Image (cartoon, rainbow, N blue to C red):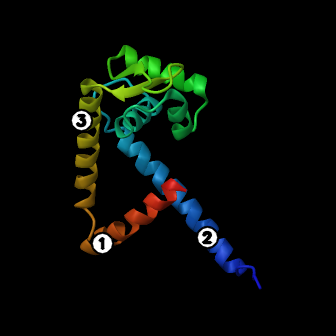
Amino acid sequence: MLTNPPRTSLRGDARLASALRVSLARLNRRLRKQAAGHSLTATQVATLATVERHPGITPGELAEFEKVQPPSMTRVIAVLEDRGLVERTPHPTDRRQVSVKCTDAGAALLNEERLLKEAWLARQLKELTPEERATLRAAAPILEKLSQM
């Protein structure tokens, strides 16, 4: 027999959800400020990172992955291609499709972006106590799991 969770648990989960949402949004804004010297939008950087992780991805798969409409993704890919950060090639098995892959310039931009953000975050982590850092270490896989749901 299924039972309903206690109301206090639901209220506690709602408070946790609210606190996480606010804190993660603030942290994300702070990290975005550490961007490399480029004029890419957050969507363009996220798309470039996805293409780097999934070489040969199709625009449709990319749109689904990034949770945007295909026409929007087509525009994002066009901007990245114009800047020499990705290239489109014929799909190996479907002549109607193209595959997208990251160029060396795109990979270099992402590497610079990651290094800047990680350096900033590492400096912030040094301000925490060892116990606080241990708590974050334990929470990192859980936050990753949440991001994949």
Total residue callouts: 3
Q: Quadrant of residue 129?
A: bottom left
Who comes first in sequence, dot 1 or dot 2? 2
Type of residue at label 2?
A: Asp
Q: CA distance from mark 1 to mark 3?
A: 27 Å
Instruction: Relative to 31, say whether 58 is above or below.
Output: above
Label 1 packing within 10 angstroms: few (<14), some (14-19), many (20+): few
- Residue annotated with mark 1: 134
Front one among 44 and 129: 44
Type of residue at label 3?
A: Glu
Q: Position of residue 147 (x, y in %)?
A: 49, 54
Q: CA distance from mark 1 to mark 2?
A: 23 Å
Q: Residue at x 72, y 78 (%)?
A: 7
Front one among 24 and 90: 90
- Residue annotated with mark 2: 13
Q: Position of residue 109 (x, y in %)?
A: 27, 30
Q: Quadrant of residue 64?
A: top right
Who comes first in sequence, dot 3 or dot 2? 2
Which quadrant, please, contains the N terminus?
Answer: bottom right
Q: Are marks 1 and 3 in contact (CB under 8 Å)?
A: no
Q: Residue at x 34, y 35 (%)?
A: 52
Q: Is residue 81 left or right of residue 109?
A: right
Q: CA distance from mark 3 to mark 2?
A: 37 Å
Type of residue at label 1?
A: Ala
Helix, strand or loop at label 1? It is helix
Instruction: Relative to 103, say whether 122 is above or below.
Output: below
Q: Is residue 27 left or right of residue 66?
A: left
Q: Is residue 2 left or right of residue 142?
A: right
Who comes first in sequence, dot 1 or dot 3? 3
- Residue annotated with mark 3: 112
